[in-house]
Amino acid sequence: MNDLEDFRSQQLMFIANAITTRGLAVMSVGSGECSVPGCVCEPEPVPWSYTIGLVERRHPEVVTFGLPPKAAVAVLNWVHDRDIAGTRIEPGAIERFNGVPIKLVPVPAEWVTSDDDPMGQWFHHYRIGRASIDPPPVLQLLWADRHGVLPGEAGCERGVEEVQPRLLDRPRKVPRRLTAIQGGRGSRGRREPSRR
């Protein structure tokens, strides 16, 4: 087994263990904190993180953009914890995480299944032993600027809007350069598991 295959096996074990022990895994993409053997990652213009495992609770997976991995893990774990506590965040409702307004909005299936493979590790994990698998339902977590204004609302700070492309408006576009290592398609070679 080569280093890349060994790394991918370790990722799958991390995901399975995280789902078993915590109920979800959070994958961060494009943060520049890559641990893929031989990869010298530079941060992507817009990093993102997504969950793997929420579908096992009949909850859509969640993706968020523009947050460093630790912040993304914290807010995505909070979404999960709310669901476990019976206070699921409904799409479109504005809630507060550490005082910051957040909102979950639907993500088109076209984004999830695009050729850029934005949730590649989700498919790697759930495709094991299956010939094919349907894409999961996904919600995007939007977070507000320092004035409490969410992307898509009048007056949202430009920088906050730029790092949070609203996927509902651009379902086929992954907001980053397409870079991959060792022949992987899209972002498949750029996954970094974020450990809690």
Image: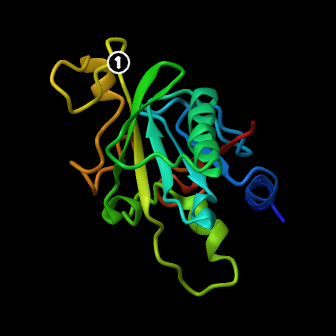
Circle 1 SS class = loop
User: Which residue is labeled 1 in the image?
Assistant: 145
Residue at the far front: name it: 86
**At 65% across and 32% down in the image, what residue appears?**
33
**At 63% across and 85% down in the image, what residue appears?**
130
Residue at the far bottom: name it: 131
Residue at the far left: name it: 154
How many callouts does the rendering have? 1
Give the residue type that dot 1 points to.
Asp
The colour scheme used here is: rainbow
Q: Is residue 152 above or below residue 131?
A: above
For this view, does 166 lie left or right of residue 133?
left
Whether residue 40 is visible here, answered yes or no, is yes
What percent of the width, then of the height, locates residue 183? 56, 60
Residue at the far top: name it: 147
Q: Nearer the viewer, residue 42 or 134?
A: 134
What percent of the width, then of the height, locates residue 30? 52, 37
For this view, does 196 lie left or right of residue 104?
right
What percent of the width, then of the height, locates residue 110? 31, 64
Neighbours of disc 1 within 10 Å: few (<14), some (14-19), many (20+):
some
